[in-house]
């Protein structure tokens, strides 16, 4: 038995929710990488179209979703929510577990929720080309699809370890018409510099971002596009949580705990920010939990400071939880979570104790992923599996405490392109990495010096 909770096409949200309107304290300013002063629109104009810059700084609570974007959203939205009855039975919990399934999108994850509006605004602003990066490939696939729909050329710098691990993601991007290169690449100064130091570099999202930013800044017809971290990206993802709130009403229930994996933070923001509005207003008190890999423990072991979003120090400085901009994580299979920093909004809300964070090793995460697959029938992405594991742990803790909780997590994508990871798990080749405290300390020593 399975309970599927659906909304009608007409119930796709008409606006995105902007958490900046309700944050207890204003967001920390974004600083120019050269001057250390707050950036203005002119500083960002070479990289982003003006509508996205306006969304980046807006304090307007509800921002309208363009009709053309909603029409494309309707290819897969509203996404379904399920009550995971078979999972509940398998782990013997009295708690109720729900999951919002974003893997039904054409690209297989939540990423098109922002790729489509980013492509739309770039097209409307006269840009012809987009340069971007991708870790595991979900974002690159989504942006390739967005470029395809709006007639934009797309170049994707894919973290090399994922380029090698996930060839089918690359093939999907190329099927949409994108050009994909492994990062670090010989195509940019940033890439060439890394390769000269380490020809076998596995790459990192920080390096790939440096390459994409350099590419975009060198051409007037090109924008840079980011799949997480930035305020406007988190904004676009709130369609997930807005739909989930309406679906919870249909289920006559409300979550005690809202869970999502967290790399850059857009997935967590997508499902969590609308529920945080309830928490901030005092109407409800849900716990919102970010789950990250123990090998890349940004929130749980990083520090809250200004840092660059990329390795080559080309991006503006964001105040965020960081492991250091030159941090290179181990090549775990959850490539979308291998980022040194986090969204400035997620970071500030975590610093203010409105969010929680947990970290787990990949072997326990894959164990829970397989339990989920064998009960619910869906193969989750390695990233999403962190949320599954946290949901199972929450349910078990509730049982031990003699309580019954309502748990909601975001199943942010399917794992059909991640079968090599499951093969490694089934054959005992996965190992857990605990990032050494000494390495973290070294990276943090190299943070930029910013005046208070």
Image (spheres, helix red, strand yellow):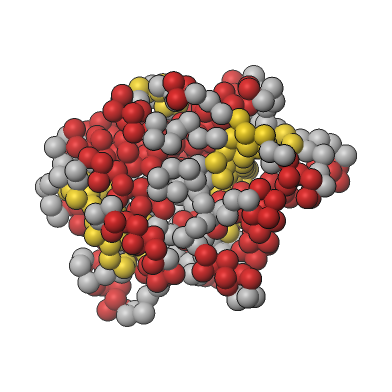
* Residue occupying image coordinates x 11% and y 47%: 220
Q: Quadrant of residue 164?
A: bottom left
Residue 426's x, y, as percent? 63, 71
Determine whether, in the image, residue 17 is placed left or right of residue 187: right
Can you say whether 36 is above or below 419 in the image?
above
Q: Residue at x 31, y 35 (%)?
A: 117
Residue in front for this viewpoint, 266 or 351: 266
Query: In the image, is residue 382 above or below residue 332?
Result: above
Q: Image point 78% across, 38% down: which residue?
A: 95
> Among all residues in the image, which is located at the extreme front?
1
> As drawn, is 161 to the left or to the right of 386?
left
Quarter holding the C terminus is top left
- Point out residue 25 in the picture as x, y percentages from the top left corner: 49, 29
Say which of 334 and 281 sits in front. 334
Is residue 30 visible from the viewing direction of this image?
no
Q: Does residue 94 appear in this view?
A: yes
**Direction from residue 174 to residue 279 in the image, left or right:** right
Count of all numbered marks drawn on residues in the image: 0
Residue 288 in picture, x, y percent from top left: 62, 38
Residue 161 sits in quarter = bottom left
Quarter of the figure with the N terminus:
top right
Report x, y in % for residue 172.
35, 57
Residue in the picture at 28% in, 66% down:
181
294 shown above or below 286: below
On screen, residue 194 above or below 96? below
Farthest left residue? Answer: 220
338 or 340, which is in the foreground? 338
- The answer to whether 21 appears left or right of 152 in the picture is right
């Amino acid at each position: 038995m399975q309970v599927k909770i659906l909304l009608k096409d007409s119930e796709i949200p008409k606006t995105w929710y902007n958490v900046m309107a309700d944050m207890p304290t204003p967001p920390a300013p974004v600083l120019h990488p050269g001057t250390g002063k707050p950036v203005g629109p002119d500083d960002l104009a070479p990289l982003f179209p003006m509508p996205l810059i306006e969304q980046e700084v807006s304090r307007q609570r509800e921002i309208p979703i363009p009709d053309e974007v909603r029409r494309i959203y309707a290819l897969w939205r509203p996404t379904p929510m399920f009550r995971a009855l078979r999972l509940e039975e398998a782990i013997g919990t009295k708690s109720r577990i729900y999951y919002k399934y974003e893997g039904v999108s054409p690209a297989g994850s939540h990423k098109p929720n922002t790729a489509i509006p980013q492509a739309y605004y770039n097209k409307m602003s006269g840009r012809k080309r987009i340069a971007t990066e991708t870790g595991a490939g979900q974002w690159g696939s989504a942006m390739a699809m967005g470029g395809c729909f709006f007639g934009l050329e797309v170049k994707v710098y894919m973290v090399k370890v994922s380029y090698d691990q996930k060839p089918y993601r690359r093939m999907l991007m190329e099927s949409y018409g994108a050009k994909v290169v492994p990062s670090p690449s010989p195509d940019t100064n940033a890439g060439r510099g890394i390769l000269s130091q380490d020809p076998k570099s596995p790459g990192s999202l920080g390096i790939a971002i440096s390459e994409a930013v350099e590419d975009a800044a060198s051409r007037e017809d090109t924008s840079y596009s980011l799949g997480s971290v930035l305020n406007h990206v988190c904004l676009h993802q709130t369609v997930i949580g807005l739909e989930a709130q309406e679906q919870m009403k249909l289920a006559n229930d409300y979550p005690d705990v809202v869970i999502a994996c967290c790399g850059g933070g857009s997935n967590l923001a997508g499902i969590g920010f609308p529920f945080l509005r309830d928490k901030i207003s005092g109407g409800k008190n849900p716990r919102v939990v970010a789950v990250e890999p123990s090998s890349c423990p940004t929130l749980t072991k990083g520090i809250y400071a200004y840092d660059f979003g990329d390795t080559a120090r080309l991006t503006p400085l964001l105040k965020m939880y960081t492991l250091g901009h030159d941090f290179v994580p181990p090549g775990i299979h959850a490539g979308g979570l291998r980022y040194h920093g986090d969204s400035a909004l997620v970071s500030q809300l975590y610093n203010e104790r409105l969010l929680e964070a947990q970290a787990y090793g990949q072997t326990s995460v894959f164990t829970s992923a397989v339990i989920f697959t064998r009960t619910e029938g869906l193969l989750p992405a390695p990233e999403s599996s962190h949320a599954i594991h946290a949901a199972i742990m929450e349910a078990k803790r509730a049982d031990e405490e003699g309580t019954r909780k309502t748990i909601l997590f975001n199943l942010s994508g399917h794992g059909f392109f991640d079968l090599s990871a499951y093969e490694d798990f089934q054959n005992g080749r996965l190992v857990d990495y605990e990032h050494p405290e000494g390495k973290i300390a070294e990276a943090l020593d190299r943070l930029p010096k910013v005046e208070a």
